[in-house]
Image (cartoon, grey):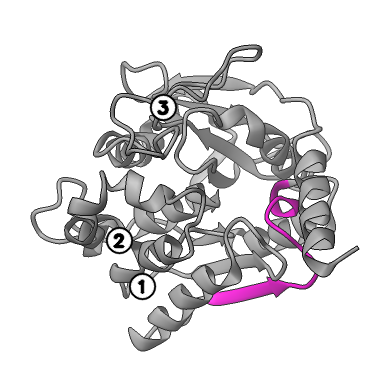
Amino acid sequence: MPDDAAAAARAAAEEESAFSHPPVDPDATAAYGDHPDQVIDFYAPRPGTQSAASPAPLVVVLHGGAWRARHDRRHITPFAHHLARRGFAVANVEYRRGGRPLIPGQDNGTREPHAEAGDTPPAGRWPDTLDDVAAALDALPALVREAFPQADAGRTVLTGHSAGGHLALWAAARHVLPADAPWRTDGPAALRGVVALAPIADLKVAEKLGVCGHASRQLLGGQEVFEERRAYADPVLLLPTGIATTLVQGRADLVVPPAVAESYAEATAKAGETAGLTLLADVGHFPLIDPAADACAVVAEEIAQLAW
């Protein structure tokens, strides 16, 4: 089998494994807004884990899926449950995305009214996607106090996969957004750190590589506003953050190639910071959130190093 065909076959097998786990229902759910997608699912640390008897470090999860509606938070619930079994309290955040949800048995290839020609479905909703992530993070401390006493919000680690990795890096950098940005905060978020998993961390590099069908361009609203809005949405431009940051990336990732994370790591160095970059050999895009994969154990350890 040619190398390219072998790589594609391996990537397909990795994706199949990651999506083979049944969704795991949360222990509690709380709303941070009125839209059905403005909710956070909570997973308590499981009995027998080192944190089950006391408030546990809180891991906030932002799922991927190219900011498109066909992938919601349910696909990452096995990963959230995996972290709960490792002793973490977990908050799995939903947010508004582009396009319509994937409905089994129906043709979801119909072009959305606001999609770019040839790009279906659209990625993200400007500014709704960023509105929601900011609102969720702002509401989280109060929601934790009210609905999730098992969690210690003072020991919070933010993580996200793929497009969710972009959102995690962005959320941690809101205090360095332009002064006129509606999401800007007065100071850095109270985070132990960020662990970004195969993140779309540099929107310009991702666009050059055509990542996820040019999802970065769609997230920002199209080519006409891409450069203008990058200042408000591209993590590589929002540095330094002063927040401990680690990126975990598969060297064999065909969905979000390593060049995207490497560009972000280089930019942090130029900004006077160091972002840890863990490159995993023979690992693609999906093992990072697959509880059956060794790469997922590496991710849990990276989170633990920041949280405990």
Instruction: Indicate which disc, 1 or 2, sits on the residue closer to the N terminus.
Output: 2
Helix, strand or loop under label 3: loop
- Location of residue 118 (image quadrant): top left
Kindly give the residue lying farthest to the top in the view shown: 105
Residue ID at (72%, 59%): 284
Can see residue 305? no
Q: From mark 3 to mark 2, how far is it between C-alphas?
A: 32 Å
User: How packed is label 2: few (under 14 Cα within 10 Å), some, or many (20 or more)?
Assistant: some
* Residue bearing mark 2: 188
Kindly give the residue lying farthest to the right in the view shown: 1
Q: Which mark is residue 262?
A: none
Residue type at mark 2 is Pro
Instruction: Indicate which disc, 3 or 2, sits on the residue closer to the N terminus.
Output: 3
- Location of residue 232 (image quadrant): bottom left
Above or below, 299 against 278 in this view is above
* Residue bearing mark 3: 99
| Quadrant of the drawing holding the N terminus | bottom right
* Residue bearing mark 1: 242
- Location of residue 125 (image quadrant): top left
Residue type at mark 1 is Gly
Labelled pair 3, 2 in contact (Cβ < 8 Å): no
Above or below, 271 against 101 in this view is below
Above or below, 140 against 214 in this view is above
Q: In this view of the protein, which residue sits in the foreground, 167 or 210?
A: 210
Q: Report the side of 110 relative to 272 (left or right).
A: right
Residue ID at (47%, 82%): 274
- Residue 86 pos. (x, y %): 76, 47
Helix, strand or loop under label 1: loop
- Residue 110 pos. (x, y %): 45, 22
Task: State the extent of the magenta-drawn residues as a range.
Answer: 276-289
Kindly give the residue lying farthest to the left in the view shown: 180
Can see residue 147? yes
